[in-house]
Amino acid sequence: MEMGEQPKPVPLTSPRDPAESRNPYVFIVGAARSGTTLLQRMLDAHPQLAVVNETYWVERKFRERNGLTRAGEVAPVLVPKLLESPKFHHMGVSEDDLRRLLREADPMPYARLVRRIFDLYAERRGKPLAGDKTPGYVRRMDRIHAVWPRARFVHIIRDPRDLFLSMRDWPIAKTTVGQDGTWELDPAVSTALYWRHSLAAGRQSAAKLAPGLYHEVWYEDLVASPERQLAQIAEFLDLPFAVEMTRFYERRHRTEAELSAAIDRRSLRARGDQWMPPTAKLRDWRTQLSSTEAERIEVAAGRFLSALGYERSAIRPSPAVRDHVARVQEIFTRNLIARGRELPTDW
């Protein structure tokens, strides 16, 4: 599709017909601090697509069968469990909404209930399609695909050295990357290992999807050429390109705040509701990382760094750095396994 060419809008079924619903339509995934929120805001600005900012409950409830029967059908206890889920209020769906949706079918398959929840989210936004941005789903795309086989996935990838700069300033970095017990030992190497695991596990999961459902985008390309990259993503999603996606930052209020009474609006104002446009070099490892940190991240990132087209600062890493990274990786890997995380085949 040429930049100026406008494809025809995707044929859409009525959200009132849950059997034919195309929702959840797309999942934005990737390592934390990779630009998933930026991409979510861009795609959410599309006139046909509403993208909620994180769920986590969607896949987890099905995997844990928490409130479901063995056959994957909804049990009454699921309603309070959903309402108690930390991220569920992002959908703006009340207890009355849930019970009304459950009356549509008895028994109600979980897959259908989730479709209807996303239908409702889209309908209240005045749009036909709804998606989700949850970074951690990068490792579980195949499991989501097994339940919602038409869902698409956009995986955003960022240079791990710049990702570490963002992670280092993030208040909850230790509880994200630090889950595997090496943050205090070396936060730079820990971040690189977390990035590598997310990328390798994500690509391994994506290999199990049906053709045409997976797309990768580089954060650096998205920031440098947002219109071109968004045009490619829109084509992947079978949606017409919409200039509103490039002007997302002109919107001043989070959709979640508008939909959910559970969010304290005073807290929202205290945090600030201004969104920045894509900004190149906001973080630049070449000037903001020490040479030692950059070298350690490059060693920990392994072959993926060069395979993704990222330049290296250290052509021949020192034996001391290699030994240090190997020690951290051994602990990181042991803790990954202890937490029940599957190791990618090329780990």
Image (spheres, grey):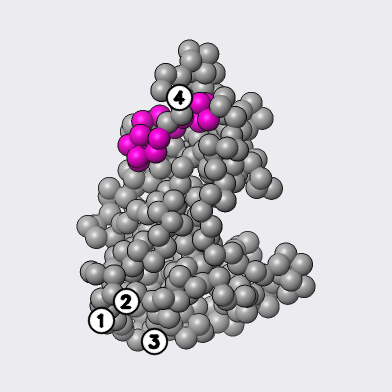
User: Mark 2 sits on what residue?
Assistant: 240
CB of mark 1 within 8 Å of CB of mark 3?
A: no
Q: Nearer the viewer, mark 2 or mark 4?
A: 4
Stretch of the chain drawn in magenta = 294-311
**Mark with earlier residue (2, 3):** 3
Tell me the quarter of the picture where residue 26 sits: bottom left
Residue 21 visible at all: yes
Q: Is residue 133 above or below residue 108?
A: above
299 part of magenta stretch: yes
Tell me the quarter of the picture where residue 107 sits: bottom left
CB of mark 1 within 8 Å of CB of mark 4?
A: no
| Neighbourhood count class around disc 2 (C-alpha, 10 Å): few under 14, some 14–19, many 20 upward | some
User: Mark 4 sits on what residue?
Assistant: 314
Disc number at residue 16?
3
Q: Nearer the viewer, mark 1 or mark 4?
A: 4
- Identify the amino acid type marked 1: Lys
CB of mark 2 within 8 Å of CB of mark 4?
A: no
Give the side of residue 84 with respect to residue 271, left or right: left
Q: How many marks?
A: 4
SS category of the residue bearing label 3: loop
SS category of the residue bearing label 4: loop
- Identify the amino acid type marked 4: Ala
At x 49% / y 40%, what residue is drawn?
160
At x 69% / y 73%, what residue is drawn?
262
CB of mark 1 within 8 Å of CB of mark 2?
A: yes
- Identify the amino acid type marked 2: Pro
Q: CA separation, marks 2 and 3?
A: 23 Å
Quadrant where the C terminus lies?
Answer: top left
Q: Nearer the viewer, mark 2 or mark 3?
A: 2
SS category of the residue bearing label 2: loop
